[in-house]
Amino acid sequence: MYLLSIANRVRASELLKGFATTTFWSALSKLLIVLTTLYCSNVLTQDEFGEFSFIRNTLSTVLLICATNFSGLAVKFAAEAMLSKESLKKLYILFLFTVGISLLIGASILISPTNAIRSVVGGSGNVTYFIKLTGLFLPVFMLQPLLSAMLRGFKQFRLVGEYELLLSAFYFVVIIAGTYWGRSNGAIYALLIYYLFFSVIGLLVVSKYNKSVHYLVKVEELTSQKACLKKIIIPVFLMSFVEAPLLWFAQAEIAKRGSYALVGGLSVILTIRYAIQVLPTYFYQAFTPIVTLLNMKGEYREYFNKFKKVSIALALVFVVLFVVLVLTGKFILGIFNEVYISYYQSYVISLFVLLFSLYSVLFKLHMMIREYQTVMFYMTILSSFFFLISFYAFLYFSFDMLNSFFYAQGLQYFIQLIVSVFVCNLDKKWNSV
């Protein structure tokens, strides 16, 4: 009876229903990705796993940061496009801009001298070769997160979950096959094949879905919404352009000053943190289209109440989760490989950083919905400056490299959190809620 009552409450709540649906399907897909990392960390040597992780983290850095910023806009524009053709124009402009910029960035990587790339990343010629190969396919890779985000904006959580689960199963198989065939090189080739396949299947899924709903229709022109390019999209791109190279550069410094084995350790910790972030991330994805529509309708009291409830729930859940993860940390690291238990201190620091990260993402979501992208850009510049300065300061005073990375990242997210909470409270006051 109690379980039936919970099920009825979930069905009655649009937010909980979207969260439950997304979690059920997509959590399975992320489990397969974590299992793949476990396999690679145990089969490959530390240096081989480090090289594979460097390429994967390079892709993840660009895709996740650009995707977090750009896909947030894609969710917003798609949710609004169900009611407004003008927002559909914004969605089209976002896709065109993303593909165009990806072409320019990819081309710049391709024409960069090999020695110049090697001077930045260090390591073997293999790493340089795969970075150039990544540049070649970057425009296609960038489509995948935007396509998934657009479907979430249309509230197609189950469809996205099924699509991601299918492709994660493909990832699991192809990476294991690539590792068996060619060790770290084979795994990297398999990784690139996976990202290409993900984007192509995404296009097919969106095309088939649109035939039944016709949300994506022809528009006469896009010029009526060209102002959104300057006001919203370009500031978001500049944020990504600051954040993505910055974090990648920090990773490259760890590889140059230390070793690719250290990058492997960083990858293991980030993979664990990534797995922890699955539930709150999916909750935010279900949360975004709902609060976007509340904002669009001017229902500000309900809008800000939802942010308040989510922030309280997040704190309660995180305290319990943090204690469990600290107590089981060495066991979790040992699952990847016993050598990674030595990174336990960095792992604990990363958990503290995670709290700042989750809250900053939540309140930056408010800034994105309310279209304060220019403020977000300046906030990103400020926090990134402190990340860079503090990272090198910690290294200068001989702190552990991974500890230095997470200390600096913690400061970065803390500054973003302070600014975004201030803006949210100010906005709440202006709207007399």
Image: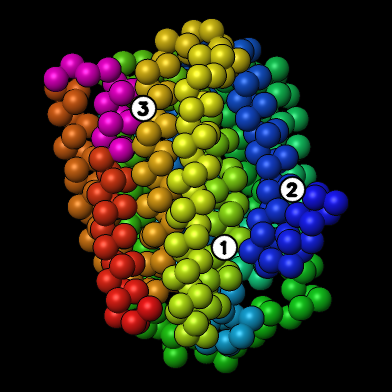
The residue labelled by disc 1 is 287
The answer to whether 425 appears left or right of 97 in the picture is left
The residue labelled by disc 2 is 25
Q: Position of residue 184 (x, y in %)?
A: 57, 20
Start-end of magenta stretch:
397-410
Q: Earlier in the sequence, mark 2 or mark 3?
A: 2
What type of secondary structure mainly makes up the magenta span? helix
The residue labelled by disc 3 is 349
Q: Circle 1: is it few (<14), some (14-19), or many (20+) Cα within 10 Å?
A: many
Q: Tell which tag, 2 or 3, sits nearer the viewer.
A: 3
**Residue 337 lies in quadrant:** top right
Distance between mark 2 and mark 1 Cα atoms: 17 Å
Task: Decide which of 380, 356 is in the foreground and name it.
Answer: 356
Q: Position of residue 335 (x, y in %)?
A: 60, 15
Q: Earlier in the sequence, mark 2 or mark 1?
A: 2
Q: Circle 3: is it few (<14), some (14-19), or many (20+) Cα within 10 Å?
A: some
Q: Is residue 401 magenta?
A: yes
From the viewer's perspective, is residue 382 above or below residue 433?
above
Task: Decide which of 2, 251 is in the foreground and name it.
Answer: 2
**Identity, as a three-letter code, of the amino acid under mark 2:** Trp
The residue drawn where x is 66% and y is 19% is 39
The answer to whether 295 appears left or right of 332 in the picture is left
Distance between mark 1 and mark 3 Cα atoms: 28 Å
**Identity, as a three-letter code, of the amino acid under mark 3:** Ile
The residue drawn where x is 58% and y is 87% is 85
The answer to whether 409 appears left or right of 274 in the picture is left
Q: Is residue 133 visible?
A: no
The residue drawn where x is 47% and y is 69% is 305
Q: Position of residue 399 (x, y in %)?
A: 22, 19
Task: Decide which of 96, 280 is in the foreground and name it.
Answer: 280
Task: Decide which of 167, 48 is in the foreground and name it.
Answer: 167
